[in-house]
Amino acid sequence: MPLRWAVAALVFSIALFAQQAVTVEKVKEFVHTAIEQQLPDKDVANALRSLKLSERLDDRTIEELRREGARPKTVAALKELAEKSADLPEPHPPAPRKVYVAPPPPSPDEQARIIEDAREKALAYTESLPDYICSQLTRRFIDPTGHESWHATDVILARLTYFEHKEDYKLITVNNNLVTDKAYTSVGGAISQGEFGSMMRGLFDPKSNAAFRWDSWTTLRGHVSYVFSYSVPLEHSQYTIEYHSTAADQGRRITAAYHGSIVVDQPTGRVLRIGLEADNIPPDFPVRQSSEVLDYDFVKISDHDFLLPVAAEFRSLAGHTSARNLVEFRNYRKFSAEANISFDDTDATPAPENTPNQQTPKP
């Protein structure tokens, strides 16, 4: 929000407050908002001086607000309010916060039904997806220490085509520089493929023999959802990891067992998130760890809503170097051989963290 609009909103809210005596709790809320929005100290102080309190403001509350970020003029105005309210009654204690108790897990029979329903929808999803094209924007980071000290390395734009149930990646730009006649894997380093349909199909294919177990309730982007953990044994796995030591080599590939979790939307039974982590990687393989989180959401294409990948986070560890890719899927449209990718796709705001953020759903 532009500063002038934030100040205008502040003045308007204070005008409403000034029409009646306000509680200490309202004053605290107001100061917290001013701190979060970094509003000018002078404007906040002037607004506070226009208030009339219904309760006593004490020094302890003022000191708490100062430690939380209230600036000098704001603190001075609060002290003036404290002097004016010295003869008023003490503040009422805040109402106790409601403790939400999560509902019990579904019965074993219901859990089995949820998984089978999700499997049916997932397999139908991958089989019924029409031919589409989108841009896949990947921001890559590395940490040579392996201690979450990330450094940006490059931004890769690719055209991802889903045609006749198969994915194809065409490299378009690297750091906004046009790339022609080079394979997607030629960029070297850590890359991921298969998010468009392969991951979901590989997990729910009966041949994968995935074992699902109830985990918890959660909310994801406002959807009350089930969380199930799962594991896929090596002998049934379709999950592969490739390692290229240079951009030119053919690299090595292994198949790995894996485990993770899925988030299933309660009303629709559709999978909204898949988390995956490789297990028992051979000790002589250069990649020691590999994991991915893939988010799905409904995307409108030609006036129809389709559940499609929207973001992913891929992590790996090779030697002592960690790699992290933040992936966004954009500009979905129906496939045509003439479809192009706009260079503007690389100019958008960086993707947010895509790691799971599970919360207990509210009733």
Image (tube, rainbow, N blue to C red):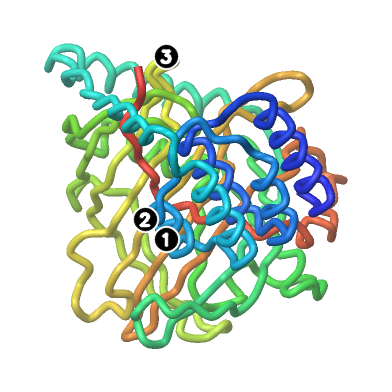
Answer with left or right where residue 198 lies relative to residue 97: right
Q: Point out residue 101 in the picture as x, y percentages from the top left corner.
A: 21, 23
Nearest to viewer (mark 3 / mark 1): 1
Q: Classify the position of the C terminus by image quarter.
A: top left
Q: Residue at x 42, y 44 (%)?
A: 199
Determine which of the numbered discs, if any, sits on residue 60 in the image: 2
Please name the residue that numbered disc 1 is placed on.
63
Q: Residue at x 52, y 65 (%)?
A: 325
Answer with left or right where residue 8 lies relative to residue 147: right
Along the line of sight, which residue is nearer the eye, 25 or 320? 25
The vertical placement of 291 against 88, above or below, is: below
Graded by Cα atoms within 10 Å as few (under 14), some (14 to 19) or many (20 or more), the crowding at tag 2 reads few
Secondary structure of residue under mark 3: loop
The Cα–Cα distance between marks 3 and 2, rounded to whole angstroms, is 48 Å
The amino acid marked with disc number 1 is Glu
The amino acid marked with disc number 3 is Pro
Please name the residue that numbered disc 3 is placed on.
267
N-terminal of the two: label 3 or label 2? Answer: 2
The amino acid marked with disc number 2 is Arg
Answer with left or right where residue 34 lies relative to residue 339: left
Secondary structure of residue under mark 1: helix
Q: Point out residue 282 in the picture as x, y percentages from the top left corner.
A: 20, 72
Graded by Cα atoms within 10 Å as few (under 14), some (14 to 19) or many (20 or more), the crowding at tag 3 reads few
The Cα–Cα distance between marks 3 and 1, rounded to whole angstroms, is 47 Å
